[in-house]
Image (cartoon, rainbow, N blue to C red):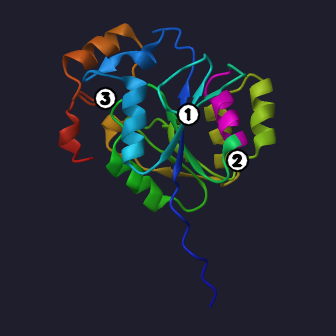
Amino acid sequence: MRTDPPLAPVRHAFVLLGRATRLPEKFLLAVDGEPIVRREVRLLTEAGLEVMVVSVLPRDLGGVRVVADPFDAGPLGGLEVALARADGPFFLFGGDMPFLGVAGIRTMQAEFDGRTLVPVGPGGEWEVLHAIYAGVDARRVEALRREGRGLKDLVAELDRAGGVRFLPAGAIEPSSFRDVDTAEEYRRLARDPALGPTGRRSSDFGGG
């Protein structure tokens, strides 16, 4: 009886830095004394991932590899840039998520079955910027971008074609998904950076 060999762990990650119109330069705001994007790159590197930052604006992040996003079309454009540089499946993260957890990354690596893998957040939302992308047609991504569509539109298409698997809510520590979009969110985070997106501390969830 033929059995397929186990899939190799996903080892590459792309971190997206857009324009952040609601909170300009939020990626450089400090959490625990460390700029969010630098903290994120460090956490991902400590999780064993090779990290590349995809940025709409020129960046010098001190030794971190940064590639330009010429499309300025949101996360879907960033994914298109990542696809042009990836040689296999990869993680895609937003650049404003300071509490990415090693435990969650390892869970996703273990659960990856060759299809795009998207966690579901505590409110039932698709966490498309904390996902593994695989089997994505770059031509279709380009077409969607030109139509003004978004990353969730792509995931919906993959879902209809059976090309995506969703991890149920609770599989990943919810604080991993917490991002920073507004000044008020940053003020709350600065007052107590351990709080996850539901107001509970990340330590309550037992993740790394």
Residue closer to the observer: 41 or 100: 41
Image: 185 above or below 97:
above
Work out how far the residue at label 2 is from the one at label 1, CA to CA, in angstroms.
23 Å
Q: Amino acid at mark 2?
A: Val
The residue that label 2 is drawn on is 136
Reading the chain from its start, which is encountered first: label 3 or label 1?
1
Task: Name the side, left or right, on which 205 lies relative to 81.
Answer: left
Q: Is residue 76 magenta?
A: yes
Under mark 1, the amino acid is: Arg
Q: Residue furthest bottom?
A: 1
**Where 96 sits versus 85, above or below?**
above
**Residue marked by disc 1:** 65
Instruction: Please report the residue visible at 61 percent of the width from the left and 52 percent of the height from the top.
Output: 89
Local packing at callout 1 (Cα closer than 10 Å; few below 14, some 14-19, many 20+) is few
Locate residue 208 relative to residue 37 in the image: left or right. left
Query: Which of the two discs, 3 and 1, sits closer to the camera?
Result: 1
Q: Nearer the viewer, mark 2 or mark 3?
A: 2
Residue that appears at 72% across and 22% down? 71
In the rendered image, is residue 170 in sight? no
Q: Main secondary structure of the magenta part?
A: helix
Disc number placed over residue 197 in the picture, else none: 3
- At mark 1, the secondary structure is loop
Q: Look at the image and tell me in which quarter the N terminus lies.
A: bottom right
